[in-house]
């Protein structure tokens, strides 16, 4: 039953992050969002995903791999918006 807590928490986190990236993409604005936010998130997600694989924590493997994809998307959306605004 404890696995439900992990997967539910994963869904909540992914929905929250996804909503933010979608909002930036839809509004074509990234005011106040540092390009370092997504760079740091990418680096941390690579590390957490690797660690999760090594310790066989599959909920974290999936969550961190999906967060990595969101971070890459967020980086490109933010960068595109910043170039457009310049």
Image (tube, rainbow, N blue to C red):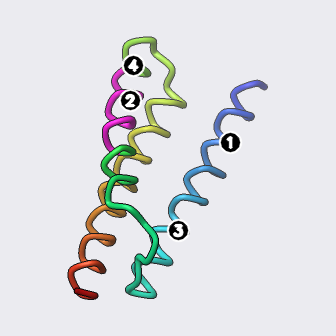
Identify the disc placed on residue 20. Answer: 3
Q: Position of residue 14 (x, y in %)?
A: 55, 53
Image height of 79 relative to 55, above or below: below
Q: Which one is nearer the viewer's eye here, 81 or 6? A: 81
Q: State the extent of the magenta-drawn residues as a range.
A: 42-50
Q: Which circle, 3 or 2, is nearer the viewer?
A: 3
Residue at numbered disc 2: 49
Disc 1 crowd, CA 10 A, few/some/many (<14, 14-19, 20+):
some
Residue at numbered disc 1: 9
Q: At 69% from the left edge and 28% from the top edge, which residue is drawn? A: 3
Q: Which comes sooner in the sequence, label 3 or label 2?
A: 3
Mark 4 and mark 2: Cα distance apart in space: 5 Å
Image height of 15 relative to 79, above or below: above
Q: From the image, which quarter does the N terminus lie in?
A: top right
The reply to whether the C-beta atoms of the residues labelled 4 and 2 are less than 8 Å apart is yes
Secondary structure under the numbered disc 2 in the rendered image: helix
Mark 3 and mark 4: Cα distance apart in space: 26 Å
Identify the disc placed on residue 79. Answer: none
Q: Position of residue 38 (x, y in %)?
A: 36, 53
Q: Is residue 45 magenta?
A: yes
On the picture, is 16 further left or further right than 72? right
């Amino acid at each position: 039953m404890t696995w439900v807590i992990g997967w539910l928490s994963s869904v909540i986190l992914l929905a929250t992050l996804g909503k933010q990236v979608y909002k930036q993409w839809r509004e074509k604005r990234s005011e106040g969002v540092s390009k370092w936010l997504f760079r740091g998130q990418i680096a941390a997600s690579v590390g957490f995903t690797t660690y999760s694989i090594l310790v066989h924590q599959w909920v974290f493997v999936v969550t961190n791999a999906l967060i990595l994809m969101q971070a890459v998307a967020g980086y490109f959306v933010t960068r595109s918006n910043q170039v457009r605004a310049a």
